[in-house]
Amino acid sequence: MIVWLSARCLADTQPPSLAEIFVKGFAATDRESRLKLARTLLSEVEAIYNAIPNLSPEQARWLAAERERILKLKDDVALWARNLDTLMESKEFRLEKSKNAFGNLQIVLRNFNEKHTLQAEVSTWVAVAWQLVDRDPFAQLESLEKEGLIKVPKNKLCAHFLGDVIAHGLGREILRDIVLPGVNKFEAPK
């Protein structure tokens, strides 16, 4: 009986929204609240982006030359695959990939404005959520930091909650609480 009551109490309580970590009193149905979330996320993403060093000209040339060299191996699939794996494990490739991922997220977050139609805003939130749920950029950050190649800012987006990066859960919440209701609004019969 006690176990049933405990489970029942847990089922009736709604866990706090991860968006609340970024914007106190966040309401997914309020446009100003959503824009404030976007601005807050932008500042967090900018801090991460700025922590990732740009490749030196020598590193960029090496990376381009390696890509060209590997493309020429296309006739030997096994050799091509081994070389591609080695390239993808290089610090240069991982730095470039991380810089690009957080640069793209920065661009999307800067795209928010008060004049967007609901449809345009929902499309932008889809792009944000898609990038937040992608585990690879965050895994790359952790790997690069463990190797001493970067110092990841201790911000909320990179923090862990129940063994997962908060960004992943936030991306799922954005899809559930902002995107789906938004799609339902503009897809509803008129």
Image (cartoon, rainbow, N blue to C red):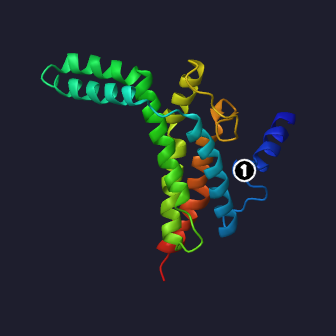
The kind of residue tagged 1 is Phe
Count the marks: how many?
A: 1
Q: Nearer the viewer, residue 33 or 1?
A: 33
Disc 1 target residue: 22
Dot 1: within a 10 Å radius of its alpha carbon, few (fewer than 14), some, or many (20 or more) residues? Answer: some
- Name the side, left or right, on which 13 lies relative to 113: right
Secondary-structure class at tag 1: helix
Residue lying furthest bottom: 190
Q: At x 50% / y 73%, what residue is drawn?
A: 186
- Name the side, left or right, on which 116 lies relative to 82: right
Q: At x 60% / y 72%, what residue is drawn?
A: 114
- Name the side, left or right, on which 110 lies relative to 21: left
Q: Nearer the viewer, residue 44 or 160?
A: 44
> Is 44 drawn above or below residue 114 in the view shown?
above
> Percent position (x, y) of residue 112?
56, 63
Camera sees residue 30: no
> Percent position (x, y) of residue 94?
44, 28
Camera sees residue 67: yes
> Percent position (x, y) of residue 53?
52, 32
Q: Which of 43 and 37 is in front in this view?
A: 43
> Is 163 drawn above or below residue 78 in the view shown?
below
